[in-house]
């Protein structure tokens, strides 16, 4: 029992020490990002020529990104249109034919059940009945 209490106490200590690590690490990361952005802002304010150049580069990068995203959207739209065409004109008829085939199979199974299986079962019952009436005939006529 004492070992169990020691184990749970050490687990609680480990949990409480790891509980503050994540917020502390996140706080340090936020602090470093804020300091970095502040230093970058000061540097850019002191160098207007570099600021204009970076602004132009960022505008060009965004324009290229918009171009790539536009092309990707066009490709997705074309692929979606092809998929819809495939579903409407090729897969739908296949599914309809499969439904017709299943209906035909149901009719065939019903026909066989009514016209083949039922008479065979009746004949088998009649033969058993005859064997019960004349058991010597069922043993080879002895």
Image (spheres, rainbow, N blue to C red):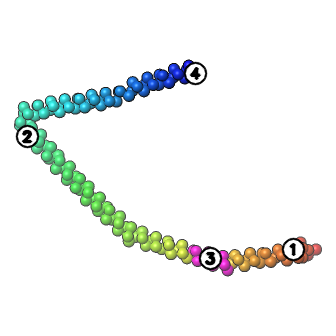
Residue placed at 9% from the left, 40% from the top? 53
Q: Is residue 103 magenta?
A: no
Q: Name the residue under label 4.
A: 1
Give the SS element for disc 4.
loop
Q: Name the residue under label 2.
A: 52
Circle 1/circle 3 CB separation < 8 Å: no
Residue 140 vertical placement versus 61 (above, below): below
Question: CB under 8 Å between callouts 4 and 1?
Answer: no
Residue 130 picture location, percent across and down: 85, 77
Rendered image quadrant of residue 103: bottom right
- Is tag 4's residue or tag 1's residue first in the polypeptide sequence? 4
Q: What stretch is highlighted in magenta?
A: 105-115
Foreground residue, 90 or 111? Answer: 111
Q: Earlier in the sequence, mark 4 or mark 3?
A: 4
Q: Which of marks 2 and 4 is in front?
A: 4
The residue labelled by disc 3 is: 110
């Amino acid at each position: 029992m004492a070992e169990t209490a020691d184990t749970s106490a050490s687990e609680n200590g480990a949990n409480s020490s790891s509980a503050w690590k994540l917020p502390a690490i996140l706080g340090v990361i936020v602090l470093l990002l804020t300091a970095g952005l502040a230093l970058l802002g000061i540097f850019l304010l002191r160098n207007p020529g570099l600021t204009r150049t970076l602004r132009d580069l960022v505008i060009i990068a965004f324009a290229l990104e918009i171009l790539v995203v536009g092309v990707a959207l066009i490709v997705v739209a074309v692929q979606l249109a092809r998929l819809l065409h495939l579903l409407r004109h090729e897969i739908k008829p296949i599914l309809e034919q499969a439904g017709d085939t299943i209906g035909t199979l149901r009719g065939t199974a019903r026909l066989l059940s009514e016209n083949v299986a039922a008479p065979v079962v009746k004949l088998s019952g009649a033969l058993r009945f005859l064997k019960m009436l004349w058991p010597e005939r069922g043993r080879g006529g002895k």
